[in-house]
Image (tube, helix red, strand yellow):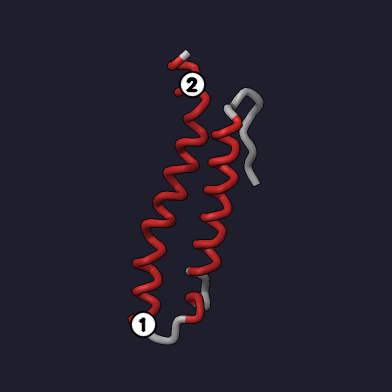
């Protein structure tokens, strides 16, 4: 589990923690057993549903890492 260095805003730490949890859930849901999907269509639908969630989690991680610089630029 990656932590942020001291000095990051508490909100960035919380965002990173939540994004990592969501990423782990997406990984579990899209794992080798395909979340219990029984057909190729179901696997494709699950992948399609998880894609935007995974993308949002990755963007949240980037936002958390950038929070320190953005806060310094503001104040």
Residue 41 place in picture, x, y as percent: 33, 81
Identified at 40% across, 52% down, the residue is 55
Circle 1 packing at 10 Å, graded few (<14), some (14-19), many (20+), is: few
Mark 2 nearby-residue class (10 Å; few <14, some 14–19, many ≥20): few
Q: How many marks?
A: 2
Q: Name, please, the residue furthest toward the front.
A: 11
Residue 33 x/y as whole percent = 52, 78
User: Dot 2 corresponds to which residue?
Assistant: 71
**Position of residue 2 in the picture relative to residue 44 (left or right):** right
Which callout, 1 or 2, points to the residue nearer the camera?
A: 2
In the image, 27 versus 71, the foreground residue is 71
Residue 2 position within the rendered picture, expressed as x and y whole percent measured from the top left = 63, 42
Q: Is residue 34 above or below residue 20?
A: below
Q: Position of residue 45 (x, y in %)?
A: 35, 74
- Residue at the farthest top position: 75
Residue at 51% x, 36% y: name it: 64
Disc on res. 40: 1
Residue at point 55%, 34% (across, down)? 12
């Amino acid at each position: 589990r990656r932590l942020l260095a001291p000095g990051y805003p508490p909100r960035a730490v919380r965002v990173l923690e939540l994004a990592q949890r969501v990423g782990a859930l997406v990984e579990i849901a899209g794992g080798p057993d395909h979340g219990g999907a029984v057909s190729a269509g179901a696997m494709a639908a699950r992948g399609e549903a998880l894609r935007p969630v995974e993308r949002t989690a990755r963007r949240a991680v980037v936002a958390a890492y950038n929070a320190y610089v953005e806060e310094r630029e503001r104040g």
